[in-house]
Amino acid sequence: MHAAASPATPLTPAVVFENVQAFQLDIFRAVGEGPADIASIARHAKASERGTRILCDFLVVAGLLEKVDGRYRHTPSSAAFLDPASPSCIASIVKFLTLPELRQSYEHLADVVRNGRTVLPGQGSVEPENPIWVEFAQSMAPMMAPLAGPLGSIVLQGRTGPMRVLDIACGHGLFGIEMAKQNRQAHVTGLDWAPVLHVALENAQRAGVQDRYDMLAGSAFEVDFGGPYDAILLTNFLHHFDPDTCVGLLQKVHAALKPDGCVATLEFVPNEDRVSPPLPAAFAMTMLTSTESGDAYPFSELSEMHRRAGFADVTSHPVPMSPHTVVLARAHQ
């Protein structure tokens, strides 16, 4: 069982990802609302008491619930990340992570390993106009929201005044929106497939920055970026492609930046051993099963990609209490 969080062990959503298949019933809401005995949880979940008991006991073993005198209660992690009453709840990610399109490859994992690529058709998850990215934009925002503030601070470093920002593969748009919130004179362009951009624009409207938010529909590899930009964001995107493809895209990014402009790449970055920390390292399997040639790249490889594309001053900025790292690089003057 996972130990309860303490000041020395800050909360992270790692346990959520480790047990993602367990969240398909509304168990955590029922536990939060109480009284959290088997009968009441089963009524809430519209499930059998036997099935509910075994599932709840499994969640205790997995570290997502505690059991005291026959009743269940949240662990600090499930209270923070899985109870819909919590402002940091990320339960919506389950809908995206359990899409049939993403699960299909795991059902043919031997073939995936033999061939070294996904069994999904075409380019896998990055096939043009793939509708799963609308679901990603809608479902994954709660998970990504806590990363937006740190990324904005790393990129802006307190900068104010007029600036132009391009958010490539923006999805939910939260990263570019955060730039506009932290710098009230920043103008942001979100780039993604047209149906996805509608989700980003809705989020920009909720944040009150829609008057400084433009949309650019199309493929990052084909559409004219325009510019020049002061900053370009590449969030959770490079890992879908092989290094040469990443270098080509980064060269295009470099050409769209102002002199001394910067690119911020948000990625799952494992250590050089590629087996630690657990979540960034394990993400390589997600890329194997869902893409033609994607990977989870150590910082040395990401740094080399940026340098090959003409960037300098490549630095690594791990995001606290997150499996993500921001790789920041500057265009040559």
Image: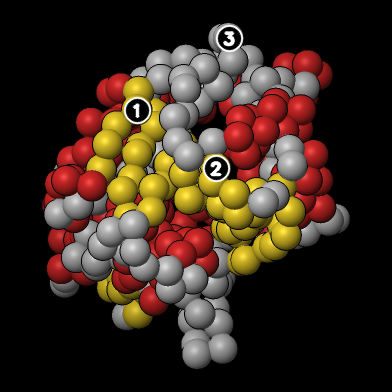
Task: Name the image quarter holding the N terminus.
Answer: bottom right
Label ID, residue 200: none
Q: Which three-letter amino acid code belongs to the residue tagged 1? A: Leu
Q: Which residue is mark 2?
A: 257
Task: From this view, report whether residue 5 is shown above or below residue 30.
Answer: below
The earlier-in-sequence mark between 3 and 1 is: 3
Instruction: Kindly report the distance in space between the C-alpha atoms of the residues bearing marks 3 and 1.
Output: 24 Å
Q: Which three-letter amino acid code belongs to the residue tagged 3? A: Gly
Q: Position of residue 18 (x, y in %)?
A: 54, 53
The earlier-in-sequence mark between 2 and 1 is: 1
Q: Which three-letter amino acid code belongs to the residue tagged 2? A: Leu
Q: Which residue is mark 1?
A: 216
Q: Kindly identify the residue that appears in the image at 32 percent across and 80 percent down.
A: 69
Callout 3 crowding tier (Cα within 10 Å): few <14, some 14–19, many ≥20: few
Q: Position of residue 19 (x, y in %)?
A: 50, 52
Q: Position of residue 126 (x, y in %)?
A: 53, 22
Q: Is 219 left, or right, of 2 in this rendering? A: left
Instruction: Kindly report the distance in space between the C-alpha atoms of the residues bearing marks 2 and 1.
Output: 16 Å
Callout 1 crowding tier (Cα within 10 Å): few <14, some 14–19, many ≥20: many
The earlier-in-sequence mark between 2 and 3 is: 3
Q: Position of residue 5 (x, y in %)?
A: 49, 81
29 or 97, nearer to the observer:
97
Between tags 2 and 3, which lies in front? 2
Task: From this view, report whether residue 51 is shown above or below residue 133.
Answer: below
172 or 69, nearer to the observer:
172
Q: Kindly identify the residue that appears in the image at 23 percent across and 31 percent down.
A: 198
Callout 2 crowding tier (Cα within 10 Å): few <14, some 14–19, many ≥20: many
Q: Kindly identify the residue that appears in the image at 27 percent across and 36 percent down.
A: 214
In this rendering, does residue 94 appear at all? no
Q: Which residue is mark 3?
A: 122
In this rendering, does residue 120 appear at all? yes
